[in-house]
Amino acid sequence: MGKLLIVVGLVVAGIGVLVQLGVPLGRLPGDIVIRREHSTFYFPIMTSILISVLLTLAALLFRR
């Protein structure tokens, strides 16, 4: 449980650093936005991939 809390804390801190540096999380190139007359569809595929890679790297570092 302790390692999980450390990983979650590091991920949150990493996201905070990225936001402070001006990385527009949620609006990255590759995110899909379809705007119609009465609706908007938003699928943050690149943001999801980035978060997945970061979580995988953090899990690999703490697994050892």
Image: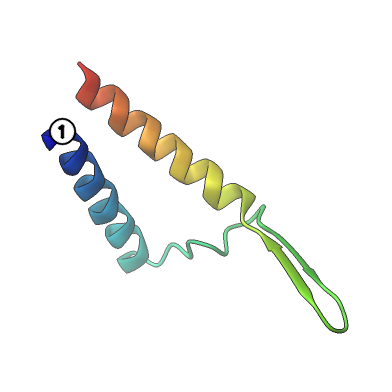
**Picture quadrant where residue 44 is located:** bottom right
- Could you tell me which secondary element the residue under label 1 belongs to? helix
Residue furthest bottom as drawn: 38
User: For the view shown, which residue lies furthest in the front direction?
Assistant: 1
Please identify the quarter of the rendering in which residue 53 is found. top left
Q: How is the image coloured?
A: rainbow
At 45% across and 45% down in the image, what residue appears?
Answer: 51
Q: From the viewer's perspective, is 27 left or right of 43?
A: left
Q: Name the foreground residue: 17 vs 3.
A: 3
The x, y position of residue 37, in whole percent, is 88, 83
* Quadrant the N terminus occupies: top left
Query: Does 45 appear above or below 61?
Result: below
Q: Residue 40, relative to residue 62: is it above or below?
A: below
* x then y, percent, for residue 56: 39, 30
Q: Residue furthest left?
A: 2
Q: Amino acid at mark 1?
A: Lys
Q: Is residue 17 left or right of residue 29?
A: left
The residue that appears at 20% across and 16% down in the rendered structure is: 64
Indicate the position of residue 31 as horizontal and vertical percent values: 66, 56
16 up-or-down from 35: above or below: above
Q: Which residue is mark 1?
A: 3
Crowdedness near tag 1: few (<14), some (14–19) or many (≥20) residues, C-alpha within 10 Å: few
In the picture as drawn, the residue positioned furthest to the top comes out as: 64
Residue at 63% over, 49% down: 45
* Figure disc tally: 1
Foreground: 3 or 58? Answer: 3
Horizontally, residue 49 falls left or right of residue 13, namely: right
Give the vertical position of 45 relative to 23 (above or below). above
> How far across and down, in percent of the image, does residue 61 sit?
24, 25
